[in-house]
Image (cartoon, rainbow, N blue to C red):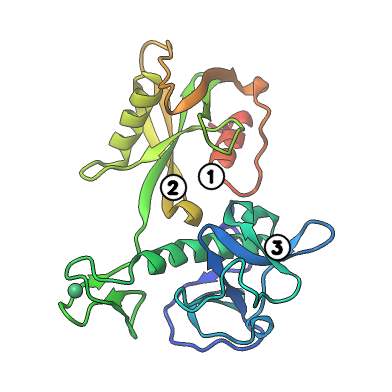
Amino acid sequence: MIQDLGEKRLNNAYELRRPAPGDRFFRFDKDKILVRTQPDGRILLPTAGELGCPQGQYLFAIGGDRYFLEFPSKGVRQGDEVMPEGFTFESVRNFRKLELKELAFAAATAYHLYQWYRDNRYCGRCGRPVCHSDQERALYCPSCGNTIYPKIAPAVIVALTDGDRILLTRYNGRAYKKYALIAGFTEIGETAEQTVAREVMEEVGLKVKNITYYKSQPWGTDSNLLLGFFCELDGSDQITMDEDELSTAEWFHRGEMLEEDDGFSLTREMMAVFQRGER
Ligand SMILES: [Zn+2]
């Protein structure tokens, strides 16, 4: 999965740091990220030096490399004249094209933090500007004392099985066109297991039993923590599809599955685990 980087690990301990010229720098503009595209299609991230050492917020380190976020209010934006030569803005949804897997994970995680900083410049309680904490990853309001922590939205990924069959779906109206699993956000007051049962009922009209937790995955582009569950069909296998949410929902035998583990997503790993007969 995207967060599995072998020997390298994410170190997200909060520190007060200034960028050094070799540190990698994230400059976002809405849902785009500043990159340099190589002739072979790989994309690279700029260093602080290449951007003229702007001010930035230290984010995290991976395997000794440090990553910073350009302060949102100070950045040069897409279309401005002062763009470093050879760099362009690319959709953050294309982060998998980054030259190394750790950069793809760094980009998704940085985008999660960028969205939180961007959307919390003023206190939601009293409306005054907020400050960055010196102590932890938090913003605080000097006027009313409100503290704002990063927002993480839990969501479930559900592999619904019936013997040697698994339910695969395709989303309606989204860029991702391959087969996927049932998925949805946890609502306030629910357990993750209740989310599993509710989402399956809402999307395909089926009952489930024997819900078991598999693994989790941070998915920063949507500010998610994804929680993967396997569960079994309980009763009728007659699908009633939510056509607003899905374009396809079908039972597939293990041997009919074509999508392979892409090394990035929890969904694809769970599909591969079932395909290999490990569940
Ligand atoms: Zn306040």
Closer to the camera, 81 or 174? 81
What is the spatial separation of the Cα atoms under label 3 and label 2, in whole angstroms? 22 Å
Tell me the amino acid under the disc marked 1.
Leu
Tell me the amino acid under the disc marked 2.
Leu
Numbered tag placed on residue 113 in the rendering: none
The mark nearer the N terminus, 1 or 2, is 2
Numbered tag placed on residue 100 in the rendering: 3
Closer to the camera, 72 or 46? 72
Numbered tag placed on residue 226 in the rendering: 2
Tell me the amino acid under the disc marked 3.
Leu
Instruction: Determine the secondary structure under disc 1.
Output: helix
Task: Classify residue 180 by image quadrant.
Answer: top right
Closer to the camera, 111 or 161? 111
Res. 85 in view: yes
Left or right: 146 as drawn, with respect to 130: left
Residue occupying image coordinates x 28% and y 71%:
122
**Quarter, ligand 1:** bottom left
In the rendered image, residue 82, in percent from the top left (x then y), is placed at: 64, 78
Q: Where is mark 1, residue-wise?
A: 266
Residue occupying image coordinates x 53% and y 76%:
75
Is 179 located above or below residue 83 in the figure? Answer: above
Left or right: 40 as drawn, with respect to 34: right
| C-beta proximity under 8 Å, tags 1 and 2 | yes
At label 2, counting other C-alpha atoms closer than 10 Å, the crowd grade (few under 14, some 14-19, many 20 or more) is many
Name the mark nearer the viewer: 3 or 1: 3
